[in-house]
Image: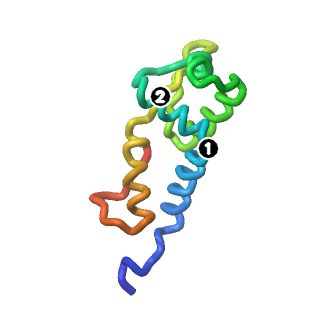
């Protein structure tokens, strides 16, 4: 059996599925885009003001994005600041190529 005839390893497939699932929501894509474009940490309040989405909704989406490490959280006392995880987000296009069987230089790792 050629390597091209085999599916991805289960652990790798599960990791990529979690990434795709995290980005399967328009609000989460907006938050990722906002943080990536700002390139500096933002509070939930700043994200709410920029996105026009309610605080509880933004907090929920940030939790999901943090779980897959697309967003990193820094705690300052009782408040938190969120920033894009450049390593993870830069891996995402390569992950899509891996899933589709396109040649890629290395398997992406989100840290």
Asked if disc 2 and disc 1 are in contact, CB closer than 8 Å, the reply is no
- Pick whichever, 88 or 96, lies toward us: 96
Report which residue position mark 2 lands on: 35
Q: Quadrant of residue 29?
A: top right
- Report, in whole angstroms, how far the alpha carbon at label 2 lies from the one at label 1: 16 Å
Q: Quadrant of residue 2?
A: bottom left
Residue 98: horizontal and vertical position, in percent? 40, 62
Q: Nearer the viewer, mark 2 or mark 1?
A: 1
Residue 36: horizontal and vertical position, in percent? 43, 31
User: Pointer 1: residues within 10 angstroms few (<14), some, or many (20+)?
Assistant: few
Does label 2 or label 1 sit earlier along the sequence? 1
User: Pointer 2: residues within 10 angstroms few (<14), some, or many (20+)?
Assistant: some
Task: Give me the residue at 48% from left, 61% from top.
Answer: 12
- Pick whichever, 51 or 16, lies toward us: 51
Task: Give me the residue at 42% from left, 42% from top.
Answer: 89
Q: Is mark 1 on a helix, strand or loop?
A: loop
Report which residue position mark 1 lands on: 25
Residue 6, compared with residue 47, is above or below; it is below
């Amino acid at each position: 059996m050629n390597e091209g005839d085999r599916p991805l390893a289960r652990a790798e497939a599960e990791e990529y599925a979690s990434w795709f699932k995290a980005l399967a929501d328009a609000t989460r894509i907006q938050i990722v885009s906002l943080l990536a474009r700002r390139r500096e940490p933002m509070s939930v309040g700043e994200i709410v003001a920029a996105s026009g989405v309610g605080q509880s909704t933004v907090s929920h989406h940030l939790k999901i994005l943090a779980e897959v490490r697309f967003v990193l959280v820094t705690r300052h006392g009782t408040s938190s600041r969120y920033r894009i995880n450049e390593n993870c987000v830069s891996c995402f296009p390569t992950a899509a190529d891996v899933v589709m069987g396109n040649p890629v230089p290395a398997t992406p790792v989100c840290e």
